[in-house]
Image (tube, rainbow, N blue to C red):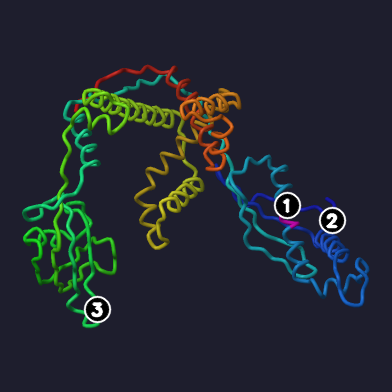
Amino acid sequence: MAETDIEITVAHRDAARRTYAVKVPAARVRVAEAETTAWYGKRAKLPGFRKGHVPAQVVRRRFGDAIRQSVLEELLRQTWERAKSQEALKPIGDPQVRNVKFEEGSPLTFELSVDVKPEIPVGRLGGFRLTRRVPPVTAEMVEAQLLALREQKAPWVPAGDRAKSGDLVAAAIANLEDAEAAAPESVRFVLGQGRALPELEARLMELDAGGTWEGTLRFPEDHADIAKRGLTRRVRVTLHEVKRQALPQLTDDFARELGDFDSADALRDAVRADIEAEARRDAEARLRAELIDQIAAANNVAVPPSLLERALLASAEAYGIPEDQRARFAGEFRPVAEAGVRRELIVDAVAEQAGLAATREEVDARVAEIARRRGESAGAVRAALEKAGRLRELERSLTEEKVFAHLLGLSAVEEVPAAR
């Protein structure tokens, strides 16, 4: 081995993570330092020296820290390129560098850890018995959705009696325990939606408009604000206004206001069609989850811990979970994250094994289809998808469609109406 060769040895490995112990010989470090010093020397402008003629010792004295940082970054880059080639890695994301020891005149040593695409053995992909259960759409479901549409368009009008659940109230709450408190806090919310303490809502429903109640409110033990759990506070509550929604009638005019519907019956038919389509999508999602579970069990597909932790961290960040609540979130969300990772591993393995990854032509065709529906150009749609970071998502969905079509063709699927 040459005296300047970088030594990369496996320190730890599992199905989805590799950790390497790296040693960069002192001779290799000296070569990198000399090259970096020369690079700075050619560009340095220092008093008393012509550009490009600054002595190396002066350059090192003036730019020592920057040179050292540049050398470290360059050697890390070279090591990473060597590791990918030497170990035939399929990395997922950037590597992590830990335990760096970079002392003058000594070898550079550190640990390099990276998540890699695991090799998932999938031998049995078919012969499963599956059930697709599509629940029937009832008249009650259609009417409930129509009611929701009417509520969205319903104006708020003053109520002539006391407030009840579903009413919009405007009130003022004064904290009687704080002598230095500012003016009473004005609040406005809909009763029954969980936006206020249940006891406060009950008191408001006992008041006439303009009425006042004084008393003690207690925050429940499971209150969202941890600091307030179990606390009591003496307050004065004044109810200013009560409003109630005036539901519009389900008429042909109302249907036309909502969209391209000629009549209330046409709106009702469209609502039923939407609910039926959603029921079919939900049934298909459950069917695919059942298929993935059976494939995972038949092939003993385990989720690598490093990928699971990576998925949990990404989910916590996506949901905006605070740092002090992430351990609890991870415990509750772990089954969902594990199922998601297992699904991705199996889909990727099948797509690679059967050559089912979405092609550029298929992606272009789907983009063109979206463009036609929107009445836009394909170029504009592609640019918008790329800007939003969703082109990869589109490609992924196409791959999944092909994979599940392939897999479902290998098993028996029984169609069973789901009971409500």
| Whole-number angstrom distance, CA of label 2 to CA of label 3 | 74 Å
Residue 256 appears left or right of 49:
left
Say few, some or many: other residues with alpha carbon within 10 Å of mark 1 (under 14 / 14 to 19 / 20 or more). some
Identify the magenta region.
Answer: 74-78
Q: Amino acid at mark 2?
A: Glu
Q: Which mark is residue 79?
A: 1
Say few, some or many: other residues with alpha carbon within 10 Å of mark 3 (under 14 / 14 to 19 / 20 or more). few
Q: Which residue is mark 2?
A: 3
Q: Residue at x 10, y 71 (%)?
A: 215
Q: Which residue is mark 3?
A: 181
User: Residue lying farthest front?
Assistant: 253
Residue 106 in magenta? no
Q: Amino acid at mark 3?
A: Ala
Q: Mostly what secondary structure, the magenta segment? A: helix
Query: Which mark is first along the chain, 3 or 1?
Result: 1
Q: Amino acid at mark 1?
A: Thr
Query: Which mark is first along the chain, 3 or 2?
Result: 2
Residue 294 appears left or right of 138:
right
